[in-house]
Amino acid sequence: MPGPALTWELADGVAIVTFDLKDSPVNKFSRAVKDEFLATFTALEQDRAVRAIAVFSGKPDNFIAGADIEEFVTIGSAAEAERLAAEGQEMMDRVTRFPKPVAVGIHGACLGGGLEFALACHYRVATDHPKTQLGLPEVQLGILPGASGCQRLPRLIGARAALDIILAGRSERAPKAFRLGMVDELVHPAILQDITIAAARRLADGWRPRRRRPGGVLAWLLDRNPLGRRLVFRTARRQVLERTKGHYPAPLAALEAVEHGLKHGMAEGLKREARLFGQLAVTDVSRKLVQIFFATTQLKKDFGLPNAPPPTAVQRLAIVGAGFMGSGIAGTAIVQAGVDVRMKDADLPRVAKGLAAARALLDDRLRRRRIAKYEYARLAALLSGGDGYAGFGRADLVIEAVFEDLSVKQQVLREVEAAARDDAVFASNTSTIPIARIAEAARRPERVIGMHFFSPVDRMPLLEVIPAARTAPGVVSTAVGFGRRLGKTVIVVKDSPGFWVNRILAPYANEVGHLLAEGASIEEIDAAAVGFGFPVGPVTLLDEVGLDVAEKVSQVMGAAFGERLQATAGVTALVKAGRLGRKSGRGFYRYGGGKKRGVDPAVYELLGVHPNGGPRLAEILQRLVDGMLNEAARAVGDGVVGTPRDGDIGAIFGFGFPPFRGGPLRHADDLGAARLVAELERLAERYGPRFAPCEVLQEQARRGSKFYP
Ligand code: 3HC
């Protein structure tokens, strides 16, 4: 049995309560913890020596991570979930109505139910530390803040600001939370205890803190009168629908809970909030999003090997190639990991351009007040570059991001080996070339590995780490560990053409050519995919990736896998005509002023096709999706990913496979192998053998088995 989560001691009339859930890295509210809170508060109420209360977390860098997600996934019915939320609300209400003042000192993540608790307290002090984040991430789990968050936050900071946070499931760093009025005081961690206790004591002496209403006249106009408020809700609803395309019920339900409460009062609002929480908690969407949360949490600890040695901490990074990728990696490494970065390219103008691009990421941080000026100066000084390998001898890790060509990459590898330490890791940022081929040129192949970043590096959350057959286990750990320090979700994948992401994207992208040839329009193809839940359709994706890059990838895939993954000639024709996608202002679409400007009709002519109805939308979608699921299943069979979990997370974080569907392998499970095989057989008969169902799916259909048992 874990020990008690709460302890307290009395200091001059103030009860200092420490929440430290035993055997758990984070504090969370389970039923048992809630009961302990209630019992503790009862004891504190009865103890006449206690005049005020100050609550802290006993965890070094976490305040309270919210309700216990593991507990609420076991809930069987909406009614039970509704009851759970109502009990949470009662606990918060008990805190608010507590006859003695309750102040809370927040350091570390203060999320979900944790923030709801803080909101229920009478005074909030937070540290200005970067780890202190306050937010209501519930909608990201497909639920809503159900322990009175939908009522308390808008009452404290206004409907507009509260909806911004609740509907996006956002967390704010403490300084922003302070500006918004979510916390009353912002302090250095060293004085958190003292300030919070002092506030509790002053409250007990009758002091009433004056809260300013942040936001000025505009906020007053919009938040405080019914007409303005109606506008706020109408706008928010429209934005939610634009963003979720109706696939995610939670943000709309949260909106309803907030609106209902502001219209009909706190008590009615709480009832509605609990009921909607109950309904959401048992939806399939919520189940899928919670699975993703646990999968990404597991991945944070997984180094892709059974007994992975600990990673070497990278202090100095060197990068060859100061182009878009190289500078993206450099900027991200400085911003996220604060490591020393040395860049090299063939000539100084290129290096200068790369350094400027890397630094732009830092500028952006400063502009958005994510870092202070002194921090900016310190980080900017970490960045340097040249046209030779000077400084490479100090690097722990060298990443090459040069032109996607085997002999060029091998040449760079030889030069780096001559300049770098023997124990430095050499990582190739290739999207397609097998790492073993690159490593053939190495004197120390055990130090060579693949790190496939996605573009733009600072924004794309996934990293594929690719050990080759001879890569040393410690090198794998080091690459994975460094990827995590860059804030990436990392999957370790097998060294085979296209790795995971480009492998399963290949049939999806190739199908575009077939569909266009059959008279489908570009808009229809994209609309089908977006309707399914992809952030953009495959045609737009090609434009984003760059058609020259896409062409290169498809050539490699075609050469490796033959007819099945052979691309049609379309993309090549566009590249020849100088259409490289968004970066050149024209691809399948036209671009101007940073925006997509619609399909360029000239493209049809270049491709020698014209839209004339073509296949129906449902048929387009089935071809796009089933082809991808089939290839994903085949790649799992080939061992490209270690587990279905890695495959699904890779697809969701790599190119936005709809999270509410749980990933391609979960989606295949949901359809059922028998149905998928039947669909693929029909498609194969109609459109050709590229759709023939793979062995893995056929086997699953025969046995009635799944990827996730
Ligand atoms: N419930 C259950 N387990 C949780 C949890 C939660 N709310 N938050 C974190 N954990 C667990 C993780 O699963 C992990 O478990 P493991 O060690 O057994 O694998 C462990 O705590 C450590 O988590 P991380 O590895 O993620 O630690 P980090 O330090 O990297 O991050 C964190 C900490 C920022 C708190 C992050 O874990 C997080 O974002 N947690 C989820 C927060 C959240 O979504 N809260 C809302 C919950 S729903 C709610 O409150 C409903 C209410 O409105 C009624």
Image: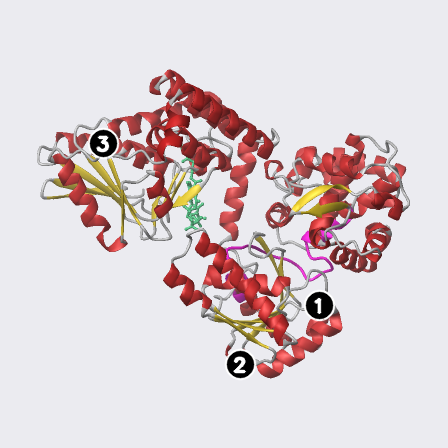
Q: Which residues are magenta?
A: 478-507
- Which residue type does callout 1 highlight? Phe
Q: Which residue is identified by label 3?
A: 39
Q: Is residue 291 above or below residue 641?
A: above
**Is residue 37 left or right of 516 when viewed as pictured?**
left
**Is residue 468 left or right of 203 when viewed as pictured?**
right
Quadrant assignment for the C terminus: top right
User: Where's residue 698, x and y in %?
Assistant: 77, 41
Q: Nearer the viewer, mark 1 or mark 2?
A: 1
Q: Nearer the viewer, mark 3 or mark 2?
A: 2
Q: Which mark is residue 403?
A: 1
- Which residue type does callout 2 highlight? Gly
Counting other residues with Cα less than 10 Å from the Cα at mark 2, is it few (<14), some (14-19), or many (20 or more)?
A: some
Q: CA distance from mark 3 to mark 1?
A: 65 Å
Element type where label 2 sits in the image:
helix
Q: Which mark is residue 393?
A: 2
Q: Is residue 128 above or below residue 391?
A: above
Single out the residue that lies furthest toward the front.
217
Element type where label 1 sits in the image:
loop
Q: Is residue 466 above or below residue 646?
A: below
**Is residue 193 left or right of 1 when viewed as pictured?**
left
Q: Are marks 3 and 2 in contact (CB under 8 Å)?
A: no
Evaluate whether residue 38 shows in this view.
yes
